[in-house]
Image: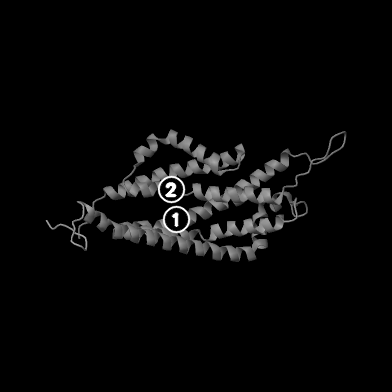
Amino acid sequence: MNEVAHKDGTALPPGHDEIEASKAPLMEHLIELRQRLIHSLLGFLAMFVICFYFAKPIYNILVGPFVRVVGTDKAKLIATHFLEQLYTNIKLAMFGAAFLSFPLVAYEIYKFVAPGLYKNERAAFRPYLFATWTLFVAGALVVYYVVMPLLIQFSVDITPQKGGDGNAAIELLPKVSEYLSLIMQLILGFGIIFQLPVVLTLLAHAGALDSVALVTFRRYAIFGIAAVSAVLSPPDPFSMLAMMAPTMALYEISILLVRQIEKKNATPPAKT
């Protein structure tokens, strides 16, 4: 066995050659990770600039559920300080950038992990890039067309509208910042939690779990989904339950998808 030595001829300690051999791949991975992070950040910044320019149309889209529920004549949001519009535009730009740059970030993640996958694993992984974005958009649409209208309608119904007879009138006038924070938090929260089928089926492909385990740990999954919903949703029971219900449906769908994967893996390849 050849002994590794310094340039001056002195011997290196045992195992030093293995350490040196591992440094190059590690540095290459770190450089690659930095490159992917830079690409993702540049994509986010580019989308931020574009979304800041189109902040008003984004605002009109996000207040759409409120306008549809209360009507155009009664739809009114208030600002409570002079620079709130500027802060609102920044918040809208960050939200739009996060939403629009999501496919780029997912692609950069794939490019980072792809070299460590076999060819068949890369082929199996690619559809998840499309599924991830599709499920994120699906979660956003559920918020926009179902959750927010129901939440707004519930708020309108329990808010007294008229005064008189010794009672003070109460009118629902949401703050711009609070309304936008609510809908953006729900959209991002639903978008994240709708990734559950992607995560579970990827784990099934990797052999880390099976359908039997998913069925066995269903009760623990319910508790976990409740905890995650409490964190990702606004601090009210309605939003939490609105997030839990579709997530539990996604968990059951994931069980069916994992069973399909197991059947596919158990089927022997056709002889040619």
Residue most extreme to the right: 165
Residue most extreme to the left: 1
Nearer to me, 140 or 35: 35
Above or below 48: residue 144? above
Nearer to me, 62 or 31: 31
User: Which residue is denoted by mark 2 in the rendering?
Assistant: 197
Residue type for callout 1: Ala
- Dots 1, 2 in contact, CB < 8 A: yes
Above or below 117: residue 148? above
* Lateral position of residue 63 relative to residue 246, left or right: right
* Lateral position of residue 24 relative to residue 65, left or right: left
Q: Position of residue 184 (x, y in %)?
A: 60, 51
Q: Position of residue 234 (x, y in %)?
A: 60, 42
Q: Dot 1, crowdedness within 10 Å: few (<14), some or many (≥20)?
A: some
Q: Which mark is residue 131?
A: 1
Nearer to me, 230 or 4: 4
Residue type for callout 2: Pro
* Lateral position of residue 123 relative to residue 8, left or right: right
